[in-house]
């Protein structure tokens, strides 16, 4: 649950600043977060 809250908070901050570069950085960070999160829980020992 906290992960979804942090994602919405990140998006809210990006929208608040209304900065394309910031939005792109947030999206990239979220993609990396989701990638490592999924990889860790699907196969922690890989």
Image (tube, rainbow, N blue to C red):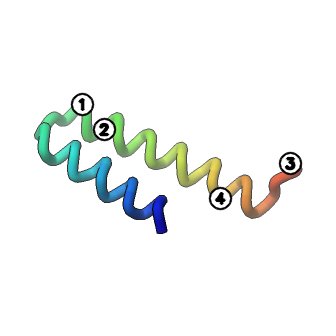
Residue at 31 percent of width and 48 percent of height: 10
Q: Give the x, y percent position of residue 27.
A: 37, 45
Q: Earlier in the sequence, mark 3 or mark 4?
A: 4
Residue beneath disc 1: 21
- Quarter of the view holding residue 16: top left
Q: Nearer the viewer, residue 23 or 2?
A: 2
Dots 3, 2 in contact, CB < 8 A:
no
Q: Earlier in the sequence, mark 3 or mark 2?
A: 2
Q: Residue furthest front?
A: 2
Q: Residue furthest bottom?
A: 1
Q: Cα distance, mark 1 to mark 4? A: 26 Å
Residue at 21 percent of width and 52 percent of height: 12
Answer with left or right where residue 40 lies relative to residue 27. Answer: right
Residue beneath disc 4: 38
Q: Residues within 10 Å of mark 3 (few under 14, many from 20)?
A: few
Q: Cα distance, mark 2 to mark 1? A: 5 Å
Q: Residues within 10 Å of mark 1 (few under 14, many from 20)?
A: few
Dots 2, 1 in contact, CB < 8 A:
yes
Q: Give the x, y percent position of residue 40.
A: 73, 54
Q: Earlier in the sequence, mark 1 or mark 3?
A: 1
Q: Nearer the viewer, residue 20 or 4?
A: 4
Residue at 25 percent of width and 33 percent of height: 22
Q: Give the x, y percent position of residue 11.
A: 27, 51
Q: Secondary structure at mark 2?
A: helix
- Mark seen at residue 24: 2
- Mark seen at residue 46: 3
């Amino acid at each position: 649950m906290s992960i979804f809250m942090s994602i919405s908070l990140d998006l809210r901050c990006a929208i608040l600043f209304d900065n394309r570069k910031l939005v792109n950085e947030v999206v990239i960070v979220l993609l990396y977060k989701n990638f490592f999160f999924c990889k860790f829980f699907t196969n922690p020992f890989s």
